[in-house]
């Protein structure tokens, strides 16, 4: 199971690995020791791969210090191991994923937020399947009542996962739909309720207000709901994902991040500054459009692939 995940991750990260691990290997194997020139070359590679100036220079400073402190010969495997450890540190190594097997509340209400097109609905479909596979009874709520195509799209995913959907007409009040959905989930003894939301309203302020209203209407029935608020970010937009994290992270009570579309982009390095900037950990990653292409985020496996130590 684990190696299947790793292989899929490795495949999904092919382009990012070429942009990072491949080039890092070339620099450190040619260098022989960790001198200033090597550090500068490493820093440039990281910056070009969307790790960003600030995070890259922080990583280099950490390497510089560690190289001074420890028994350090500067072999390429030693440099890679150090870099990998520092990346893990920034990504947050602790296991802080979603609960899958045993749930701390029932129905466990998961609110999914993020701008248009980042992969919210797709992620919900994949998550619904995952929870169903765990033996849980899942329901989804179509609270993106803003876009005409949003409900049928969620219906297709609900059909694939074999779960019930609560929906309303286009233009309905999303907070009322959320309220009805949680009531239905309680009445039908569902274990998990996943709430889809709109990613675009007339203004950012409207969007945040709407998300707050949805939270309040869930909390009316269960003061601790939503138990989880997942912010979905699209890795292909690179550093724009950081700006989105800043907007939602401050006002939407985000408890976890989902980084989607890591497959087919060379910009996977952006996870490092995003993780660093966010108070909430990265919990899931999307590595494809299929129902199986959602993985719990594993900082160690990720940094191993990013930096390049495939032992
Ligand atoms: N390659 C790839 N595409 C994805 C992934 N997640 C979502 N998508 C695609 O991104 C597009 C927008 O997804 P959607 O779920 O509609 O985004 P939403 O507007 O946030 O609900 C769709 O074409 C999805 O198939 C992923 O992990 N990898
Ligand atoms: Mg959607």
Image (tube, grey):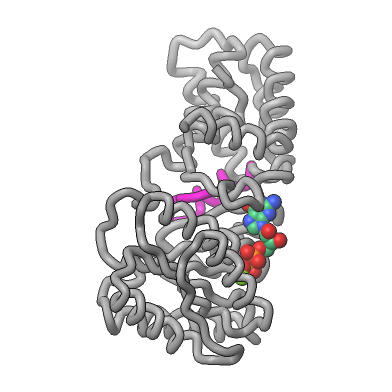
Report the residue at 65% width, 43% height from top.
268
Above or below, 310 against 190 in this view is above
Quarter of image, res 32? top right
Q: Position of residue 158 (x, y in %)?
A: 53, 66
Can residue 61 be seen here? The reply is no
Closer to the camera in the image, 171 or 164? 164
Report the residue at 63% width, 51% height from top.
290
Q: Name the quadrant of the C terminus.
A: top right
Above or below, 83 against 275 in this view is above
Report the residue at 40% width, 79% height from top.
181
Quadrant where ligand 2 appears: bottom right
Magenta span includes 281: yes
Closer to the camera in the image, 174 or 243? 174
Closer to the camera in the image, 15 or 209? 15
Q: Position of residue 292 (x, y in %)?
A: 56, 47
How many marks the image carries: the answer is 0
Magenta span includes 238: no
Report the residue at 48% width, 37% height from top.
299
Quarter of image, res 222? bottom left
Above or below, 34 against 114 in this view is above
Q: Position of residue 252 (x, y in %)?
A: 45, 72
Above or below, 294 against 84 in this view is below
The segment highlighted magenta reads 269-285
Can residue 158 be seen here? The reply is yes
Q: Position of residue 305 (x, y in %)?
A: 60, 30
Quarter of image, res 229? bottom left
């Amino acid at each position: 199971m684990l190696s299947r995940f790793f292989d899929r991750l490795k495949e999904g990260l092919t382009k990012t690995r070429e942009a990072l691990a491949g080039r890092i290997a070339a620099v450190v194997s040619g260098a022989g020791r960790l001198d200033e020139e090597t550090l500068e070359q490493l820093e440039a590679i990281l910056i070009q791969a969307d790790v960003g100036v600030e995070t890259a220079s922080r990583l280099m400073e950490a390497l510089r210090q560690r190289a001074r402190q420890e028994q350090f010969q500067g072999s390429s495997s030693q440099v890679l191991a150090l870099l990998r450890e520092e990346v893990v540190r920034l990504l947050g190594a602790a296991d802080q994923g979603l609960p899958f097997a045993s749930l701390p509340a029932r129905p466990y209400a998961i609110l999914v937020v993020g701008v248009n097109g980042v992969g919210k609905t797709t992620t919900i479909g994949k998550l619904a399947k995952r929870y169903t596979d765990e033996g849980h009874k899942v329901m989804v709520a179509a609270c993106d009542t803003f876009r005409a195509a949003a409900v049928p799209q969620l219906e297709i995913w609900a059909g694939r996962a074999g779960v019930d959907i609560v929906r309303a007409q286009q233009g309905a009040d999303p907070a009322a739909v959320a309220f009805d959905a949680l009531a239905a989930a309680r009445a039908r003894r569902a274990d998990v309720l996943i709430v889809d939301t709109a990613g675009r309203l007339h203004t950012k302020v409207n969007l945040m207000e709407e998300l707050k209203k949805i939270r309040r209407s869930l909390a009316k029935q269960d003061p601790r709901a939503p138990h989880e608020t997942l912010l979905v970010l699209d890795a292909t937009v690179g550093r724009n994902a950081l700006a989105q994290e800043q907007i939602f992270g401050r006002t939407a009570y985000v408890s976890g991040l989902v980084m989607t579309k890591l497959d087919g982009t060379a910009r996977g390095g952006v996870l490092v500054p995003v993780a660093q900037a966010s108070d909430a950990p990265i919990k899931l990653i999307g590595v494809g459009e299929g129902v199986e292409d959602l993985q719990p985020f594993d900082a160690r496996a990720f940094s191993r692939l990013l930096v390049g130590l495939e032992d």
